[in-house]
Amino acid sequence: MDAATIIESESRELIRRRGLDVRADQLEPLIREVMSDYDRRSSSGEVPVLRDDDETMVAEVAARIGGFGPLQEMLDDPAIEEIWLNSPSQVFCARNGRSELTTIVLSDTEVRGIVERMLVSSGRRLDMSTPFVDALLPDGSRLHVVIPSVTRAHWAINIRKFVAKAYDLQGLVALGSLTQQAADFLDAAIASGLNVVASGATGAGKTTLLRCLARSVGPRERVVTIEEVFELNLALRDVVAMQTRQANLEGTGEITMRRLVKEALRMRPSRIIVGEVREAESLDMLIALNSGLPGLASIHANSARDAVTKLCTLPLLAGENVSSRFVVPTVASAIDLVVHLDMFADGRRRVREIIGLSGRIEDDIIEISDVFSLRGDRLVRGDGHPPHPDRFVRAGHDLSELLGGVAA
């Protein structure tokens, strides 16, 4: 057995003998007591020598035994989508799209202990030189933490759970997020190699949509995904997932989204998926998509039109030598469809509109067409058409049959 397993087993036995509750204020001192005895025995060769530092080992064993303390019950609740702490006495959660203040009250020590346990398996760090952290929990939830003095007084923590309710486009239809006609069209668009961007606000369901769209990728395609933190977790036969990396204590070793997009092109991809476009990596993505490589991406935006506008401005962050005279035509030719999602007041997530980019530009404004849009409470066919009908034909799809009659 390794050191962590031995310390865990001995800690559990000590908890049973003393009849203790598994709480952070009792658990961590108890583990340190066990470790002190373990260190004594390891010096005489009775047990393996500890390879991790003491605090890392305490956090790992505490996570194995006690989970994540009072937050564990909410993490296990499938109805809760997100958890956030503004202070130890202000613990909120979002249940079915609606936020509520919980009755949980923690201490500063408990909050720090829980975060340390959450970070132990991620390889990411949090200190005064790196006051922000993005990490993935073992169950796939995404953790974001900000500490003082960036925050005023308390650690600000967000845990976004990936409560997947749909794994393909038919699943979205069953949830009412998408009509059958729109799902069939998107399925054909992906199979035909069109470049699709999912847009929407935080929590609108962009990552879920990307995962569902990816199920329409052909079985012989090689997919490379690029993310800040692993979230997509695609169930495909040939897929490579990459995530960014923070700089180390010496300030070196950082791996950015831009670097990952460039590396992805060297991996013989049939398609790339950029989990979320935020900054200058949008330029590298557009160049890749404009070279004949199909792809998917997501972006924060208020509407499909705003998403197109944002894709025309983000690449300008890449450097002074990048101008809108280059970017706008590149967006017009590289992006084919934008699917915009919205979250309603009752917590429902719906596709609000699907637009097509014709590739034409007038006065630096990209022409878009309304393929589907939400009218009342239903996503209906618009009067526009998607680009590249020839690609649908080559993939064996009848575009006129998919789109049916044009709405008045």
Image: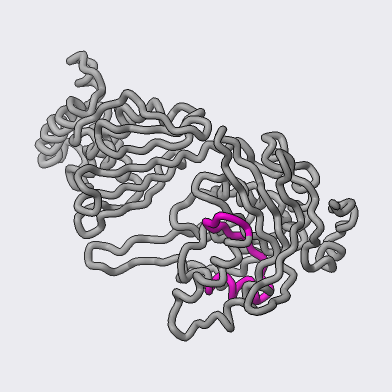
340 up-or-down from 8: above or below: below
- The location of residue 306, given as percent across then percent down, is 58, 61
Q: Is residue 6 visible?
A: no
Q: Residue at x 72, y 51 (%)?
A: 216
Nearest the eye: 385 or 260: 385
Residues in magenta, as a range = 283-304
- The location of residue 363, given as percent across then percent down, is 65, 79
Q: Is residue 287 magenta?
A: yes
Q: Quadrant of the N terminus?
A: top left
- The location of residue 266, given as percent across then percent down, is 56, 73
Nearest the eye: 344 or 216: 344
Q: Residue at x 85, y 52 (%)?
A: 408
Q: Is residue 369 magenta?
A: no
Horizontal side of 42 relative to 198 (left or right) equals left
Q: Residue at x 31, y 47 (%)?
A: 145
33 up-or-down from 289: above or below: above
